[in-house]
Image (spheres, rainbow, N blue to C red):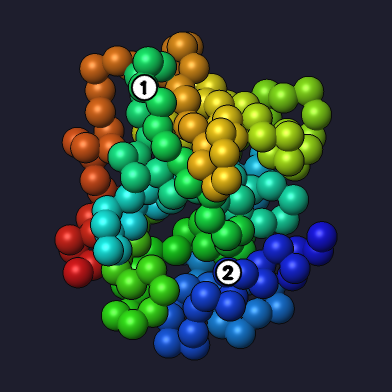
Amino acid sequence: MTKQDRLAEYRAKRGDATPEPAGSGGRRRGKRSRPRFPSRPRFTVQRHDASSLHFDFRLEIDGVLVSWSVPKGPSLNPAERRLAVRTEDHPIEYADFEGRIPEGQYGAGTVVVWDTGEFDSLTDEPAVDALDAGHLRVELHGEKLTGAFSLVHTDGKNWLLIKKDDDGADRRRKPARTQPESVLTGRTNEDLA
């Protein structure tokens, strides 16, 4: 499947009135907030205050941001399993997107980059194959999230996001509740409302 094919669902859900990037070859051009020269693939977690507040967990795999909606946000506690609902792939340019999606548009509300960084795949096979097999394990190198996490497919679009017990684990700290600000700008969703 080509990158353009993987982004077809993303583009079909968005009209021209949204400030969201379309990705290479699309209708709109995304504005990058900072240049980046990665040595590893990128991850981003966006705090999205739409019809309900949730976190969009995204991993750069095979030229797109493979995405999950995590209603309660990522947890640093290995004992907690978070529901992660698979959503459409997003263009790489979306990794730095912050802004307000207008009313009447898909995903209307505010978006901030809650965390971002790079990741290493911890599976023996390439990340795209692990994704297809329904079990992906990654090590995140972010500001709020570090260490190993597993994504395990359960059924349909439902997956589980699970923190592994390592140096990045913390059973007491709850950053999804206590740290709402963007790691890029320091703004919160409320600042954009």
Q: Which amino acid does the dot numbered 2 rest on?
A: Tyr
Relative vertical location of residue 73 with respect to residue 172 in this rendering, above or below: below
> In which quadrant will I find the N terminus?
bottom right
On the picture, is 144 further left or further right than 116?
Answer: left
Residue at 67% over, 72% down = 8
Outermost residue toward the bottom in this view: 16
CB-based contact (under 8 Å), mark 2 and mark 1: no
Query: Where residue 40 sits in the image (x, y, percent)?
Result: 67, 39
Q: Disc 2 versus disc 1: distance between alpha carbons? A: 30 Å
Residue at 66% over, 56% down = 64
Residue at 34% over, 39% down = 73
Residue at the disc numbered 2: 10
Residue 91 in view, yes or no: yes
Front residue of 86/185: it is 86
Query: Which class describes the residues within 10 Å of circle 1: few (<14), some (14-19), or many (20+)?
Result: some
Secondary element at image label 1: loop
Residue at the disc numbered 1: 80
Relative vertical location of residue 124 with respect to residue 64 in this rendering, above or below: above
Query: Which class describes the residues within 10 Å of circle 2: few (<14), some (14-19), or many (20+)?
Result: some
Q: Which amino acid does the dot numbered 1 rest on?
A: Glu
> In which quadrant will I find the C terminus?
bottom left
The numbered mark at residue 144 is none
Secondary element at image label 2: helix
Query: Where residue 137 sits in the image (x, y, percent)?
Result: 62, 27
Q: Quadrant of residue 127?
A: top right
Front residue of 68/65: it is 68
Outermost residue toward the front in this view: 155
